[in-house]
Amino acid sequence: MDSKRFTTVLIHLSLGLLYLTSGFSKLAPENLGNIIGPVKLNFISDSRASWYFMVFIAVYQIIAGALTLSQRYSLVGLILLLPLSVGILIFTLVVEFGGTPFINLFILLLLLYALYQEKNSLTKILRFNFEGLKESNSFQRFPNHLLPKIALGIISLTLSLVFLQHSILNILLSFALLLFTANLFQFIKYLLLDKILIFLFLFISLFIVNGHLKNQVFPESFAYIFIFILIGIILYFIRVVYYFKWEKRLKK
């Protein structure tokens, strides 16, 4: 897989995990963690209308994030994420959330890049030709539908059980992430660095999802997640440089 395609896969994984965990951590903050965003449903105000609105946003984030993680249905997830990402950026700018708008701008740029890679399919969808969804790069690249559908079903089950506020939520969501990762290896050959990055993503995602449980045993262990993210970024750039040189050799 060339660098452009693999970069798109990593963006799908990163955006999907970011929004999936952000949504679940709002609904089950004592069990499920995230790496960005407030976890309190009433952080805007204490009104009931605000509470219902934030529940809607949380569920929306979970649905869009899960679809983006699935790879096969990533284009649907990316389309759903666009208005949400723009809205979050505007909100953080208006309320002056310090440096948060810069982070949200970066996230939006990643999303726009991923959508640009699907420009042909998007053009058809904008013309109300929804066959463009099936013709998207991500849909064609991951033809097997069983694993992503099972994973999406498990996420739906997790969402329906979120009122339990129990460690079963961690188990279910962790299993769904394992299935999403397994789905990546169907019919596609990866470089060794690709495999390392994918397994590092799985490790980071499981660490995030189970962060609160880990903190009960090892206080402040969640802070180490950013070290693993930095390692992943370094390995990604090494991978890009390696592939660029390797590709040039093949052309000679």
Image: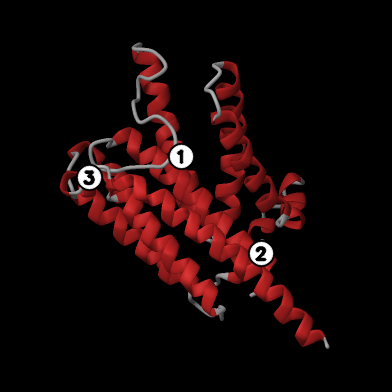
Indicate the position of residue 133 as horizontal and vertical percent values. 64, 57
Residue kind at label 3, given as amino acid type = Asn
Contact, CB < 8 Å: mark 2 with mark 1?
no
Front label number (3 vs 2): 3
Q: CA distance from mark 3 to mark 2?
A: 39 Å
Q: CA distance from mark 2 to mark 1?
A: 23 Å
Q: Earlier in the sequence, mark 2 or mark 1?
A: 1
Instruction: Give the class, few, some or many, for how many residues have Cα within 10 Å of label 2's Cα (few <14, many ≥20).
Output: many
Q: Which residue corresponds to mark 2?
A: 137
Q: Residue at x 49, y 52 (%)?
A: 67
The quadrant of the picture occupied by the N terminus is: bottom right
SS at circle 2: helix
Q: Is residue 150 left or right of residue 118?
A: left
Q: CA distance from mark 3 to mark 1?
A: 25 Å
Amino acid type at mark 2: Asn
Q: Which residue is disc 3 drawn over? A: 215
Between discs 3 and 2, the one toward the N terminus: 2
Crowding at dot 1, Cα within 10 Å, few <14 / some 14-19 / many 20+, comes out as many
Number of marks present in the image shown? 3
Q: Which mark is residue 61?
A: 1
Q: Residue at x 49, y 67 (%)?
A: 197
Q: Are marks 3 and 2 in contact (CB under 8 Å)?
A: no
The answer to whether residue 218 is seen in the rendering is yes
Q: Position of residue 152 (x, y in %)?
A: 40, 56
Specify how the rendered protein is coloured.
secondary structure
x, y (%) of residue 185?
A: 48, 75
